[in-house]
Amino acid sequence: MSSICTRAFGGWLAGCGAATAVISAVGQTILIVTSHGDVARLLYGIVLLLIPSAAVLVITCLLTAIPAAIVVWLTEEFQIRDAGFFACAGAAIGALSISVLIRSPAVWTSGLVCLFVAAGFIAGLTYWFVMRELAAGEHSM
């Protein structure tokens, strides 16, 4: 049981990192477009976005800990190993997270939900991939 918990924790952290990367990449893309080729402005913006990216990681970890633990428990209980399930669960957790973070119906029409759903989708796939690789590494020992 301990190895399952360790693998799940590692997969969850990797998923949080992947979701943060997706959200931060959108911010970086907006920065690239708005810099209009000014390299100094672009580099300044990249350095400036490091702190918000770290905050996004912390907030992602805080918002997803309990829902992810429930999903992990369910998948272990029912032996679910399908990548599609983890991707959809991640997308649902992403939608839930932005709904908790911003309590306004306007968030659903702003497109922000799509960003968080996409980030959750990637996080779910990352979790599945990490868990699969860690399990394969344990069986090869």
Image (spheres, helix red, strand yellow):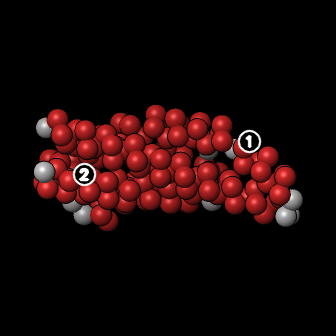
Tell me what residue is drawn at x 49 percent, y 51 percent.
19
Q: Which residue is mark 2?
A: 134
Image position of 29 (left or right of 67)? right
**Tag 2: amino acid:** Leu
Q: State if disc 1 and disc 2 touch (CB < 8 Å).
A: no
Residue 34's place in the image compared with 54, above or below, is below
Q: Amino acid at mark 1?
A: Leu
In the image, taking residue 112 as reference, residue 6 lies left or right, namely left
Establish if 21 lies above or below 7: below
Label drawn at residue 48: 1
Judge from the rendering whether residue 10 lies leftward or rightward of residue 15; answer left or right: left
Residue visible at 85% across and 64% down in the picture:
37
Q: Residue at the spot x=19%, y=42% of the render?
A: 4
- Residue 95 visible in image: no
- Which circle marks residue 88 in the picture? none
Measured in 3D between alpha carbons, the distance from the residue under mark 2 to the one under mark 1, in whole angstroms, is 35 Å
Above-or-below relation of 69 to 114: above
Give the quarter of the figure containing the N terminus. Answer: top left
* Mark 2 secondary-structure assignment: helix
Q: Position of residue 98 (x, y in %)?
A: 54, 46
Residue 110, horizontal then vertical, whole percent: 66, 57
Mark 2 Cα within 10 Å, few/some/many (few <14, many 20+)?
A: some
Could you tell me which secondary element the residue under label 1 belongs to?
helix
The residue located at (76%, 60%) in the rendering is 32
Residue 9 position in % (x across, y down): 31, 40
**Dot 1, crowdedness within 10 Å: few (<14), some or many (≥20)?**
few
Residue sitting nearer the eye, 111 or 86: 86
Label 2 or label 1, whichever comes before in sequence order: 1
In percent of width and height, residue 94 lies at 47, 50
Q: Nearer the viewer, residue 65 or 48?
A: 48
